[in-house]
Amino acid sequence: MSRVLVIGCGGVAQVAIRKCCQVSEVFSELCIASRTLSKCDNLKKALEGKTNTKITTAQVNADNVNEVIDLINSYKPDLVMNIALPYQDLVIMDACLACHVNYMDTANYEPEDTDDPAWREIYEKRCKEKGFSAYFDYSWQWAYREKFEKAGLVALLGCGFDPGVTQAYCAYAKKHEFDEIDNIDILDCNGGDHGYAFATNFNPEVNLREVSAPGSYWEDGHWVEIPAMSIKREYNFDKVGMKDMYLLHHEEIESLALNIPEVKRIRFFMTFGQSYLTHMKCLEDVGMLSTTPIEFEGHEIVPIKFLKALLPDPASLGPRTHGKTNIGCIFSGKKDGKEKTYYIYNVCDHQECYKEVESQAISYTTGVPAMCGALMLLTGKWNTIGVHTVEEFDPDPFLDALDKYGLPRSESHEPVLVD
Ligand code: NDP
């Protein structure tokens, strides 16, 4: 029995909420709160009569800490699930501390305004010190560790698929398969086709920022940064087939390098089709991916926000997306003095997801782990106080929950390695 406040009602949140409502014995009461109240009300209506979870809705601007505090104080949840955007992470963490409630999210903090001089100064120092230039990093949320520890609260960071399940796969490999892990390759393949020449599978602004940034990987104790999309490999994915994939910077590399200190190299690859890459390059070249506001016919517009308004809403891709995703981790290392390799991954079918929760597999593969992470916190299976990423907790109950609630694991002890 628990009361949960979900902030955000976009593609990922809608899946997480629908999945919470399948586990009413734990998620007995749920408040869906977001910027646009009608989205929350529509979802509540769609779920009526199909769940025993008691659902309420609320309007909230999660950029305003006092609004979030008022909402938490009036609803009194056991847990706040932040499934809005990374821009709101710090505000919602502050509100959770002020109201003494546990926190979780699906992506690490990045600022909405990357031209803010105060933020930029810290960012540029970090780029020099750490050697990667992505706008997001864990330092902002790790700075809350002491505050959460002192308050006796848990903050679970990045509990989607990647980040999220990929780190649980690493913790599982470390616990059951290896004495020492030398290399980790995280492979994220979307073999789905939505029929559009160009669309993003989750929030376009966050997605395009991530993909157009320089790539980087962890090697021998430091970051190696490379121009965007400059390392390409081909891989034959189970149930999907041969795909081109590109090395990207990704947030879980940072926490894995810290929590699996013996690891020599960690890389992240994501598949992209040629049409996506050609469109993205063109949009970037003409300035449409810029976050800097411009004057246009007497109005101020932010190019990437304008582009978001033109692109299909990721939540609308569900009915038209066919094919499968395959996301997982390939490891090499040692067990009992012998070299070994291991691959653990999940295959998810876009149309199966749509039949179950009216969403495509990208939102599904993020929303289901968010629900399972909340389940771990609410049932006390994950209860280490402080600010933590997924690999810091016991992977076994979490992977069991994923097996049960829609994202079962597959394994190979003889995987083809990525060169
Ligand atoms: P969407 O853009 O579809 O949804 C975002 C939701 O947050 C919308 O309901 C939006 O409201 C709401 N929101 C935005 N700003 C505010 C605000 N100031 N106050 C209150 N609500 C707000 O995004 P997604 O569902 O695709 O992504 C959700 C999160 O999941 C993101 O942080 C994303 O980075 C993360 N993610 C993580 C992945 C992983 O594997 N770990 C993979 C994919 C995504 P409105 O309807 O008014 O716009």
Image (cartoon, rainbow, N blue to C red):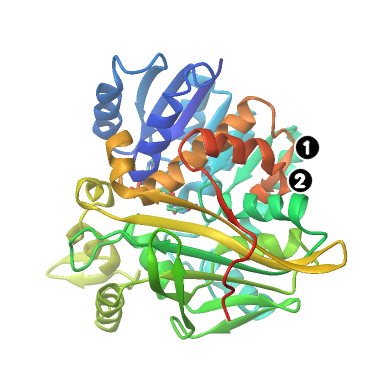
| Rendered position, 325 above or below 129 | above
Ligand 1 is within 8 Å of the C-beta of the residue at disc 1: no
Amino acid on which the number 1 mark rests in the picture? Lys
Q: Give the residue furthest to the right.
A: 337
Q: How far apart are marks 1 and 2 (CA)?
A: 6 Å
Q: Tag on residue 150?
A: 1
Query: For the residue labelled by badge 2, is the local secondary structure a helix, a strand or a loop?
Result: helix
Which residue has dot 2 on it? 146
Foreground pick, 260 / 407: 407
Quadrant in the picture for residue 206: bottom left
Foreground pick, 235 / 392: 235
Please indicate whether residue 1 sits to the left or right of residue 49 in the image.
right
Looking at the picture, how far across and down is residue 307, in whole percent? 23, 65
| Rendered position, 96 above or below 269 | above
Amino acid on which the number 2 mark rests in the picture? Glu
Q: Which residue is drawn at 29% across and 17% down?
A: 48
Looking at the picture, how far across and down is residue 383, in whole percent? 72, 33
Q: Can residue 365 be seen from the camera position used here?
A: yes
Looking at the picture, how far across and down is residue 135, in whole percent? 51, 68
- Quadrant that contains the N terminus: top right
Please indicate whether residue 148 sits to the left or right of residue 325 in the image.
right
Quadrant in the picture for residue 265: bottom right
| Rendered position, 79 above or below 167 | above
Please indicate whether residue 291 sits to the left or right of residue 263 in the image.
left
Looking at the picture, how far across and down is residue 400, in whole percent? 60, 36
How would you rate the neighbour count of disc 2 (Cα within 10 Å): few for under 14, some for 14-19, many for 20 or more? few
